Structures are given as structure tokens and as C-alpha cells.
Image: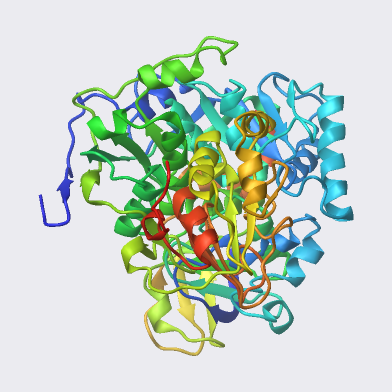
Amino acid sequence: MSDNGIEEHNLEHWRNDMGMTITEKILSRHAGLEEVRPGMLINARVDIALGNDITAPIAIAEFRKAGGTAVFDRDKVALIPDHFTPNKDIHSAGQCKVMREFAREQRITHYYEVGEAGIEHALLPEQGIVLPGDLVIGADSHTCTYGALGAFATGVGSTDLAAAMLKGELWFRVPETLKIVFHGRMRKWVSGKDLILFLIGLIGVDGARYKAMEFAGEAAGRLGMADRFTIANMVIEAGAKNGIFIPDDVTRAYVQGRAKRAFSFYDSDPDARYADVIEIDISGIEPQVAFPHIPSNVRGISQAGDVRIDQVLIGSCTNGRIEDLRIAAGILKGRRAAPGVRLIVVPATPEIYRMAMKEGLMEIFMDAKAAISPPSCGACLGGHMGVLAEGERAVATTNRNFVGRMGHPGSEVYLANPAVAASSAVLGRIAGPDELEGGGKS
Amino acid sequence: MKYKGRIWKFGDNIDTDAIIPARYLSTSDPEILAAHCMEDADPGFAKKIRKGDIIVAGENFGCGSSREHAPIAIKAAGISCVIAGSFARIFYRNAFNMGLPIFESGDLQALVSDGQRVEVDSDEGTIRVVNSTADPVRIQPVPPFMQELIRAGGLMKYISKKET
């Protein structure tokens, strides 16, 4: 291994008799083929096709234009109004209406109205709608989140969603797989968010373009589901087609009690072929911050310097789960957001919201002067519920920090984990929990 | 097919928030989206361009969100095609699925500057700089399946055709 704990292997050639990766197995099963190889174009059966209030209206129009009258299976389409909801303006209300009326007409099983709806990539696993071994497509780039369950899940466009809703199948190019092997133990205040930010910093925003990213190693097995969801969620930020964990007892414990249909655990063969293997000793990683304006512009928290901030956002499909809120509350307990800092907390689903209430986290957040938002993607993509003005800076537990992502093109977004976000809110600048008086409490 | 137009150059990793900022996603009306095309990468872009103009970019064009509003905005703004060193995969799918011509070429960026005119011949697989004696630049061949998608007029027409 090199000094930074990273070792790369180049496995240029593979033999035809070699085994398959978990991604290849799921794709071959859904294509009705005995085996698939990277580069093959296949037609594969879709278990769940997902759309939201931004992407579904275009898909619905395409569906109708193609003469579609009925979706292929009303139990296998999920339509979630989560982006610009509760409706942010008249245009958004119109888009939600298009989706709502379609869901009614088609008697879509997995349509969730505002009040029951949550951020799609937190809601679907929580409700047991996506399961291990599934092939999931979603007209949202963070559909890759479900790979945490050992499913093949990938983001597509609205026209793809229209085709999948009509036919129940879609074309795919079988991706090569990049294997990421995690070793060692995470330091305090380090989470899945830091591992994936570190990795994106290492390989770049196109480091896994068109590829599957498979997470392995004893340290990956020790990660809880929340960390796995966060990691799989952000593989798109490295350009990947999907990210995937090998399902295990942790997966089983999460899925049991949620699944209402059969599911399958797949594993990669010991002789499966990988385009590359990257080994990372995670014990050397400190909390990471992605500076503007690209997720690969990553620094360790100790190198962040003095960056004054105006807003902190804790939430999103990346870090809006109960585990994230618990970490944030552990730091915010007995503390308050610094003067001039707007702290916004967004529980990702109604169930998470309710748990946070029962556990007393909401009280902690309100005492810390946080504004608590209903579940919504709005603030993350500069839609509503926390838009930035020119020159403003935010620390966000979200996934993208492109120019204008959270508002004015002259604003800045710094991506971090919930512990760093909460600490930054208290100190009014980018900071880790170790900088707080008395340190972090949890 | 041939595409001839004036070039607008962009760098690497042009993301979908730059192509069409999320603040405009409360609609999918192509006319409205077109008016804000590339706004956060080049303010006023939509007003400056003429029909048929060509975007030339570096690596990983269209990274980020899955929003099909991005290729819709580019097409509706009147851009005839996009040439980049490489494309992010969802943008790549979307462009073929909805019928925005895109071409991969790693060599063109260094040869051309803003305002020059190029001619793309997709059948020949070449790009020529207009009024230049330089050799044409090769386009990465388009996979046969993607060619079928283009010929059919996009994914929905392709799958409808397969039925009959």
C-alpha cells in the first residue's frame, strides 16, 4: 500500500470462464440470460420504476404520446411528489397535479400524497418498496441509493421512465465494475458521508463513469444501513451507473418487517472480474468537506480554514435519516445556532419525523433555533425551503455543490456530514465537533 | 446527417444545474427551459445563440441530475448538436432517447475557438472546421443500437415500432 493507504490494481484482462459480479448477476437474471458481460446491451425486466414531481410529468406526456393507456403493473410504479412539495408555486402545483391525476387514473399502488410522502430515496427502502436483488430504475439520478440493499438501481431520464412504465423493461449496457475495498475502523465523527466524499475526491467526478461501484471489505460489512445508503446515494457524483453492497445480516435485519414480497440476496463470485480494485484504509480518514463548486473538491476538516457561513441544511436523500438527525441532535443539545446562521433540519420521511419527535430530537432542534421543514428535496436543489442569496454560503449534508445548486449562482455550498454541519451551525463557520467547547456529546 | 454551425465552447464537467438550473424545473415547457439554457455557465447564452449553433465541451458533459429538461433546453434553444470529449451516462441516454444529436470527440476542443464554424458529418464520422485546411477530426463511432434509436426518432418511437 502507498502512504495514503490506497492501492490500485489494474486487471486489464479477464477470461470467459470467470464468474460474475453481483451487478452482472442481477442484470442477467432480469434479462433472462445465463450470463452477461460488460459492454453487452440487454433488455431487462424492471421491478420498480420511480418518478417524482419534476420528472414524472415529462414521462407521463411521453407515455401518452406513445399511445400508452395502462402501466405494465400498477404495483411496480412508484410516483412520489417530493421535490417542489408542498407545492412551491403555481407551476409546481400543476406538475404535481399531472402526476396525481395519472396515479389516480392508473391506480398506482405506490403513490404517496403530501403528508405521507417523504424524500423518495429514503421513503422507498423504509416502506419496503425496493428490496435486495431488485432491478430499480428511477427518473432521478440518486436512484442509485438502493444499491445499499444489494439491488441494482440506477438513475435514468423521463423518457426511460415512460418506456419502463409502458413495457416493464428497459435497455441497459452492462457496466464494468470498480471494486472498492474498505479496511480498518472509522474514526470518531466519521461516517459513510466521509468515505464517499473521500472516494469522490480520490477518483474524481467521472472516476467511475458508466461503471458499477461495488463496496467490499470487512469495514464495509461493519457499516450500518444508514451509512450504506449515504455511500450508494453519492456514487452518481463519481459518474457511476450504480453502487452496490453485498447484502448480509445487516441488510436482512433492515428488510425484515418491511418487505411485503419475496427478495433475493446475490453475491459476487470469488473469480468475478473487475475493471479496477481500489483498497482504502478508512482509519486514516477524517471528516471531509467538499468545497465549491464540484463534489470532488474535497478537504479534510482540519484543512477547511476559516469559512464563515450563513446557513446549515441537515437533510436530503443523502443524510436525512433518523441516524443523521440523532448525530446532529447529539451535538446541538444544549447549544444554539450562531447568531446570523439559519439552521434548517429536514427529516426525510414522515416516519423519521415522528421518530425524531418521540425521541425528543425536535425539541433539541427547536432549542437550537432550527427551522424544521416537512420532508422535501426543495432546499437541496435551490427550489424552496432554504434558497441562498448572492454571496451566501451554506454547509449542507446534501450531495451536490455545483454553481447555483442551492440558489443564486453567486452562492456557495459546502458538503459535509451531519456532525460537521451541526458543529458549523453552532460556531458560524465550517468546523468539526472537536472544535466545540466540551467537544461533541454523543 | 450534417450539422453546420457556430461553436460555443465550454470546459469539463458541465453539470445539469449549469445547463438548466433547478429553479426553472417547476415547468417542462421547452420554450421556457430554452430561455434559461446554460444560464449559470454563460449568462445570456440563450439570447446570444443562433439556430443551428453547436456546443463543444470537454469531458463528462451533463453530469449530475437525471433531468431530461437539460437536453430539452439545449434542443429547444436551437442548438443543432453537442460535441464533447465524453458525456455523463444519464445525459447520454437522455439525448439519444429524446433525439438531441450528440457526438464524442476528444480532439476537437484543442483545435477550435468560440465563434468558429464546424461541419459535422455523422455518416462519415467526421468534423471539419469551416474554411480550414486542417484534416477532419474523427467522431467516436456511435454503437449500432444507438443508431437504431436515432433512426427510429427516439426511444418511445423505437419501442412502439418494435411492437408492430
Does residue A118 sit above or below A428 in this rendering?
Answer: above
Closer to the camera in the image, A262 or B155: A262
- Residue A245 image position (x, y, % from top left): 37, 30
Asked whether, in this view, residue A186 is left or right of residue A68, the answer is left
- Residue A342 image position (x, y, % from top left): 65, 62
Q: How is the image coloured?
A: rainbow
Does residue A166 sit above or below A407 in this rendering?
Answer: above
Corner quadrant of residue A118:
top right
Residue shown at 40% from the left, 30% from the top:
A224
Does residue B36 sit above or below B117 in this rendering?
Answer: above
- Residue B80 image position (x, y, % from top left): 64, 69
Asked whether, in this view, residue A203 is left or right of residue A368, the answer is left
Can the viewer see residue A156? no
Asked whether, in this view, residue A85 is left or right of residue A440, the answer is right
Can the viewer see residue A359? yes
Residue shown at 70% from the left, 81% from the top:
B44
Residue shown at 69% from the left, 56% from the top:
B69
Asked whether, in this view, residue A221 is left or right of residue B63, the answer is left
The number of numbered discs placed on residues in the rendered structure image is: 0
Closer to the camera in the image, A145 or B89: A145
Residue shown at 63% from the left, 77% from the top:
B53
Does residue A261 sit above or below A89 in this rendering?
Answer: above
Closer to the camera in the image, A188 or B157: A188
Closer to the camera in the image, A210 or B160: A210
- Residue A359 image position (x, y, % from top left): 60, 30
Quadrant occupied by the C terminus of chain A = top left
